Image (spheres, rainbow, N blue to C red):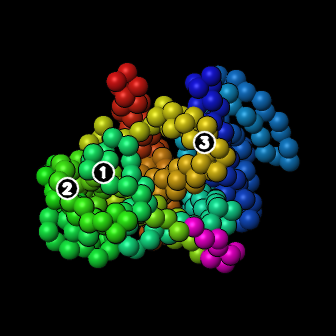
Amino acid sequence: NNMLISILSFILVISVLVFIHELGHFMAAKSVGVRVEKFYLGFNFFGLGIKKMYKGTEYGIGLFPLGGYVKVAGIIDESMDTEYTGAPDEFRSKNTLQKIWIMSAGVIMNLLLAFLIFAHLTYHNGINEPDPRAVVGKVYPEYPAELLGLEEGDEILSINDIPVSNWKEMTDEIHSRPEEEIKVSWDHNGIIKYGSVLTKKTQQFIDDNVVELGMIGIMPILNHRETDFMESLSIGFSQTIRFLDLTYRSLLALMKGNVSIKELAGPIMIAKIAGETASEGLNALLGLMAFISVNLAFINILPIPGLDGGHVLIALIEGIIRRDIPLKVKMGIQQAGLLILLMLFITIMVNDIQRLIQ
C-alpha cells in the first residue's frame, strides 16, 4: 500500500512539474510564431502511448512518466532532427532574444509554479515565528535535553557558566560543542536547576560546507500568525529565492568535493519521500512539489548541452558571432551532453538503489 502511494505521488508530482515546464516552452514558441510539432507528457518509447493531432501539433501521453518534451520546428534537440527549410515559423529563423525566450520559458514556469505554491501555503497556513527568548517550546524524546530533565516552558539561563539572554546566544554556545559535555542552568517555574549532559552531533549545510554542530534536541516556542495576500506573495518570493540559493550552494559543495556524489538522490528516493509526504496531506505534497520545481529550474538552466541552458548558450553564441554554428558541431555537442546526463542519471539511480537496500 505504501509502495503504491509512493509511486502514485511520484507520478503526480513529476507529471505536474513536467507539464508546467513543457507548457512554458509551448506557450513561448507560440507567442513568437514558432510551429510546435509535438507536445508530449511522458516518454513515448516504442510508440507505446496515446497521441492525437490537433492544429498541426501532435499531442501525446507516453507510458514512461519520467519526463516529457516539446518539439519546435527547425531545432536540433534531443530528437536529433536536422530538417530545416528556413520557413518563418521555424526556430532558426527567429532572432537571439526570441530563441532565448523559447528556451528559458520552461524554467521560468517552474519558478513561477514554486512561487505560487509557497505563496498559497503561506496564505493558507499562516507562518510560525520562533520566539526570540531562550524558552523551551518542545523537547524531543530520547535526546540529551530529555535526559537533562528540561521541560516545555523552562528558560535556559547559562551554558558552561556563560549567561545567555536569548535563543540565538544559547544555540550558538551549544552548536559550537558537538559531542561535548556541557553544563546547563535553567529556570523551572521559578526554581533554578543545574545539570550537565553530552551533546549529540548533527551535520548541517552552511554556505557550501557540511559542518558538524552540537545539539540537545529542543525547539523554541513558535508564535503562529496569519498573513495577508501581499505578505504571502512576498514570503512566497523569498522562499523561492532561498531554495534557489540552497540548490546553488549544494551544487557548489558537490563540485568542490565537500559533499559526496553519493548524496545525490534520484527518482527512487523522490518517490519514497513523495509517498511519506503524501501521507501527511496535500499541503506537504505541494511543498515538496515546489521544492523539486525550484531544483528542476536550477538544473535545467545550467549551460550543459541537452539542457535548456545549453540551448540558451548556443543561441547566445550564434547571436554574438552572427551566424549559425555548423550542423555537425551542434549534433556533436547535443550527443555529448546527452551522454553526460545519461551517466549522471545512472550514478543517481545506483545511489538510490544502494540506499534502498541499506
Seen in the image, is 71 located left or right of residue 252? right
- On whether residue 105 falls in the magenta region, the answer is no
Callout count: 3
The residue range painted magenta reads 224-231
273 lies above or below 182: above
Camera-nearest residue between 271 and 214: 214
340 lies above or below 112: above
Inspect the image, locate mark 3, and give the three-letter code of the amino acid beneath it.
Answer: Glu
Which corner quadrant of the image does residue 313 belong to? Answer: bottom left
Residue 32 percent location from the top left of the image: 71, 66
Inspect the image, locate mark 2, and give the three-letter code of the amino acid beneath it.
Answer: Gly
Camera-nearest residue between 140 and 40: 140
Label 3: which residue?
280
Q: Residue at x 51, y 33 (%)?
A: 272
Residue 344 percent location from the top left of the image: 38, 38
Q: Quadrant of the N terminus?
A: top right
